[in-house]
Amino acid sequence: MENENTERLQKILANAGYGSRRACEKMIEEGRVTVDGRIARLGDKADPTTQRITLDGVPIRHSQAHTYVIVYKPRGYISTTDDPQGRRTVLDLVPLPQRLYPVGRLDADSEGLILLTDDGELTERLTHPRYGHARVYRVLVEGEPTAETLERWRRGITLDGQPARFNQVQIEYPERGQTWLRVTVREGRKHLVRRIVAALGHPAQRLIRVALGSLELGDLGVGKWRYLRAGEIAALRREAGLERANSKTLPPSPKRQTPAGSKVIAPSKLAARRTMPSRRGKNR
């Protein structure tokens, strides 16, 4: 008979910080997980408080305090845990002993907010397409989009035979023949924002993610990071449909960190914008 602590193995592994549920399901399918010495199968359940669960022969952690970190990824960094080409990754910016994983991705030429965590359950909810969590970007595009172009982006265009649109788009301000836009999307298709703006003749020159759901980049500097505050974690979990956290969280960092040798500096224009009221509703 199952007790109240019995759960599916992929959920146990994800909650312990070994990746998303999909990644943990793959580990089980590959025969890397055992329960009390028996190779587990997908669909098996276990009680992590009384049974010995191993991954690659090593007992899993049962009570782990999850870590949540927000990073301002500079251009040129890869938003993966490692890179075969030896390029710098977002993990190089955060010298912590915990094994953290990026929630979603930004391409190498893009910058801005990346959430790193070992909370597999939250990662799964924030990245799965069916949940449609909002992502907000500031985009510097060539030219000055017309009101008609903005409306077409809102209504949607066709990419690869599928509809694609901005849930919200507005002009922030023009800048020497270019225009800063603020856009919101709720799907994570690869290079979606860049492809949508380019489709109507306004290629992106710069792209900065400034929000993921309720989590905002704020005044965090390029290449810096900090722990999420308790309220930010709670808000993300509510948005993800997780009523309460399954483990304790780490306290906020006493100070922000910058990776050694980092030379990337936010443009003065962007820095000035963060201290000034936004000029909204100026659609041309």
Image (cartoon, grey):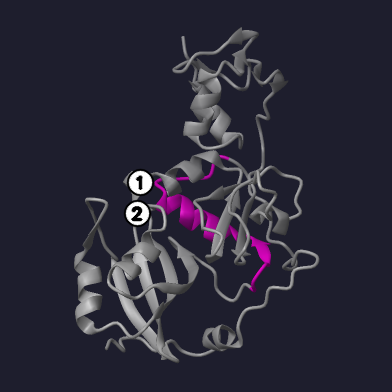
Is 185 included in the stretch rendered in magenta? no
Name the foreground residue: 4 vs 150.
Answer: 150
Q: Position of residue 69 (x, y in %)?
A: 63, 56
Residue at disc 2, secondary structure: loop
> Which amino acid type is marked by label 2?
Glu
Label 1 neighbourhood size at 10 Å, few (<14), some (14-19), many (20+)? few
Q: Which residue is mark 1?
A: 129
Q: Please give the range of residues in magenta.
A: 221-246
- Residue at 36% across, 67% down: 184
Image quadrant containing the C terminus: bottom left
Q: Position of residue 168 (x, y in %)?
A: 30, 70
Name the foreground residue: 181 vs 212.
Answer: 181
Q: Is residue 220 above or below residue 82?
A: below
Q: Which residue is mark 2?
A: 187
Q: Is residue 22 above or below residue 142?
A: above
Label 2 neighbourhood size at 10 Å, few (<14), some (14-19), many (20+)? many
Is 222 included in the stretch rendered in magenta? yes
Name the foreground residue: 169 vs 9.
Answer: 169
Q: Is residue 136 visible?
A: yes
Q: Is mark 2 in CB contact (under 8 Å) with mark 1?
A: yes
Q: Is residue 108 left or right of residue 157?
A: right
Q: Position of residue 171 (x, y in %)?
A: 34, 83
> Which amino acid type is marked by label 1?
Pro
Dot 2 or dot 1: first in sequence order is 1
Q: Position of residue 53 (x, y in %)?
A: 63, 18
How far apart are the alpha carbons under marks 2 and 1? 6 Å
